[in-house]
Image (cartoon, helix red, strand yellow):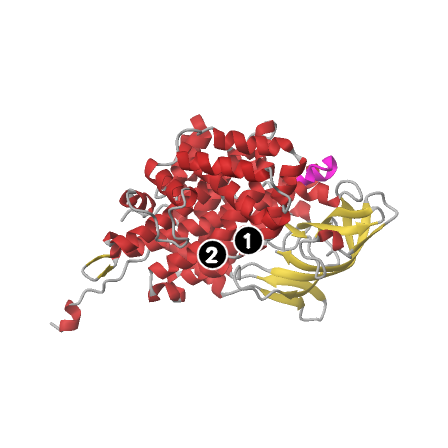
Amino acid sequence: MDPLQRVPENQAPPLVGRDTVADDAALQDAVRALAGDGSDAVLASLAPLGRLAGSAEAREHGMRANENPPRLRTADRYGRRVDEVDFHPSWHWVMDQGVSHGLAGAAWTSDEPSPHLRRAAGYVAWTHVEPGHACPMTMTYAAVPALRADDALAKQWSPGLTSRAYDPGLRAPDDKSGLLAGMGMTEKQGGSDVRANLTVAEPTSTPGDYRLRGHKWFTSAPMNDVFLVLAQAPDGLTCLLVPRVLPDGTRNPFAVVRLKDKLGNRSNASAELELDGTHATRLGDEGRGVRTIIEMVAATRLDCVLGSASLMRRAVAEAGWHASHRAAFGATLADQPAMRNVLADLAVESEAATLLGLRLAASVDAPLDEHERALRRIALPLAKFWVCKRTSFLVAEALECLGGNGYVEESGMPLLFRESPLNSVWEGSGSVNALDVLRALQREPACLEAWISEVGAVRGLDRRLDTAVDEVLAGLGELDDAEARARSVAARMAVCLQGALLLRHSSPAVADAFCASRLGGDWGGVFGTLPPGLDLRAVVDRATPAA
């Protein structure tokens, strides 16, 4: 026998044939804690999605969708303007699966137990297969509550947006079995400062109808059926609904100038638009555009947290799987103390992100509860700031766990790494969300009370958390330089909230590791510096997919 054939490959097998719901103890425990008596039904309903997400078929489609980005077709063969975007079949496959499993707008009309928590858990378990297609599903989910500002528009559009049917193509909305929504907020001169928008909404002779003229710098998913945009009406910045195709089947003037060439999110089409005589219908009152669209902002921020948690979970699973199958220097990587510390540290960060995201999703299932409303108001920007900011750091470390294997495209890790900064940029960058936390603290006292109630539920269980909470509250009384300290305040409040949730709902080993490092100060600032005396094996085993 050739001696080379006797040398073991020492390569980890592909991480396929798994169940991303059943394999995720953190996800399962969070659902059981937050869904209560309905948790078994929630997990059972997600089982088919979990098996599909862990399949070789899903992995292949996710890779293909990213390797074959969308293409803009401005005109047809006769030179007529069409402004269509063509997608690879794998894009349509992942979209069909996500929408049919209820990850778009279906939660708003579902009669399942804890529908928003169920959707959030599914979002975490599924979207890391191919992160780009999460964007149109998120915008569709987020558009539904915003439409409630106008009963007539809500009745017209919500049935299609809450459908589980994926029906692509530009046709009259009434001729389609399912609809998708997009959004056009930002312009080149303003970005997050939407009050600087210059797009003009000119009223027509029909009450509530307008014609738009202007430019939109970032509009995701230009092949979607309807868009919420902001424009300057006579009485100020106003939210408007823009259909892609009008009821009679004609195309609304909607020129796609170009598709953005992005770092990540490459399967998804993000477009630069010119609006010239584009038909729009007012949603909410003139001059109240930001107020009208705030519900959409809240929902998209939630999905930024969930999407980041999903990327973290996939990265940690890949790292743990590789380390449990790869040997070096006489032992399996996962059994070596330095690597075990890294893997445990990654797992702790990932579980804290997942639990915080699902806690916020569960609050959407209690829309009339004042505590939950106040908690969402402050915890959404907290989580959006902190979890999304941590994702790139975590994914980079997880990639390094695979060594050179993690740096090649076939591993899937570069795809995750390119995607990892996106959610921190979208829907308000870090400073925008940190400043929003300050705004909530200064203007809405109930928000701080809600945060205190959440972290206070475990008062006395861990002195490190108790000390950190006391320090936060003391610091809030000295905010003379509030804006300069916005990020540090948001970060510390977010970490305290994560620690409290882990103490209530996670395993003792994970909660102890988190409190010792993130709250107790016994941490080197990079992954793999957890202090001694922790049960790292239990943490790693909890996060590693079953062989």
> Which of 167 and 444 lies nearest the eye of the viewer?
444
Q: Is residue 365 left or right of residue 186?
A: left
The residue pinned by badge 2 equals 392
Question: Principal SS element in the magenta part?
Answer: helix
Q: Which residues are magenta?
A: 146-154
Residue at image position (35%, 36%) is: 507
| Residue 275 rendering spot, x and y as whole percentages | 75, 59
Instruction: Kindly tell me whether residue 158 is visible in this rendering.
Output: no
Which quadrant would residue 514 be assigned to in this image? top left
Residue at image position (62%, 31%) is: 446
In contact (CB < 8 Å): disc 1 and disc 2: yes
> Which of 360 and 118 lies nearest the eye of the viewer?
360
Q: Is residue 544 left or right of residue 115?
A: left
Quadrant that contains the N terminus:
bottom left
Q: Residues within 10 Å of mark 2 (few under 14, many from 20)?
A: many
The residue pinned by badge 1 equals 424
Q: Where residue 5 is drawn, which disc sits there?
A: none
Report the number of numbered marks.
Answer: 2
> Which of 334 and 338 lies nearest the eye of the viewer?
338
